[in-house]
Amino acid sequence: MRIISGLYKGRRITAPKKLPVRPTTDMAKEALFNILNNQYYFDDISVLDLFAGTGNISYEFASRGTEKISAVDDNFGCIKFINETAESFEMSINTIKSDVFKFLEKTKQKHTIIFADPPYDFEIEVFSKIPDLVFKNQLLEDEGLLIVEHSKHTDLSNLEYYSHSKSYGGNMFSFFEIKENED
């Protein structure tokens, strides 16, 4: 994987093969960040990276100037790799080793963007817990966005707060937000 843009543009990051991850493809990541670049100033936002894996998404935000980044994963190897990589690039990424669902139940911190890249084989009921917990616990700032990455074979359009999806190859990003008239 490589960093697409920003201070560390073009830098390659090689994760250990033993990590249980499926990093977001460069093509999908570039498309996602093109969308976000039109909506946000990266140095003004707070990001929560759920099921962070290699930290791929966190590094991209950090490279673009985001300083408030938290990465959550329950795998010790993933957290260790993110910490080592962030330190080598002098990025301030706060790592949290935790089950994502337990973390979402407990945290009170709000973020501008919450990105979740759970295992693609989750059942729809498990996927639905992500927006349920984020919105029930009011974890997004005003104008905030929840983005869930998933397989094109998974349809999240019936979930509450769903806004739209974008497809890139076999990857999909579903966007969730509070609409203006929903209060």
Image (spheres, rainbow, N blue to C red):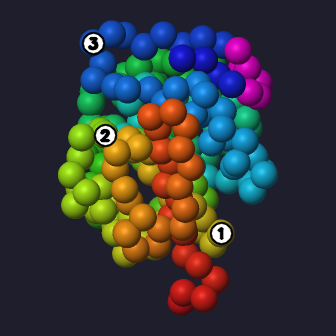
Q: Residue at x 27, y 12 (%)?
A: 18
Residue located beneath label 2 in the image? 120
Question: Which comes before the other along the chain, label 1 or label 2?
Answer: 2
Q: CA distance from mark 3 to mark 1?
A: 38 Å
In percent of width and height, residue 163 lies at 54, 67
Q: Secondary structure at mark 2?
A: loop
Up the image or down, 95 lies above or below 80; here it is below
Image depth: mark 3 or mark 2 in front? 2
In percent of width and height, residue 155 lies at 37, 56
In percent of width and height, residue 59 lies at 59, 29
* Mark 2 closeness class: few <14, some 14–19, many ≥20 residues within 10 Å: some
Mark linked to residue 83: none
Q: What are the residue bounds of the magenta stretch?
A: 5-10
State whether the magenta stretch is mostly helix, strand or loop: loop
Task: Specify the amino acid type for callout 2.
Answer: Tyr
Q: CA distance from mark 1 to mark 2?
A: 27 Å
Is residue 165 rendered magenta in the image? no
Q: Is residue 120 visible?
A: yes
Up the image or down, 63 lies above or below 67; here it is above
Is residue 9 rendered magenta in the image? yes
Task: Specify the amino acid type for callout 1.
Answer: Glu
Question: Which comes before the other along the chain, label 3 or label 1?
Answer: 3
Q: Residue at x 28, y 62 (%)?
A: 129
**Quarter of the figure with the N terminus:** top right
Q: Is residue 22 left or right of residue 125?
A: right
Mark linked to residue 18: 3
Q: Nearer the viewer, residue 182 or 65?
A: 182
Residue located beneath label 1 in the image? 143
Q: Residue at x 48, y 10 (%)?
A: 14
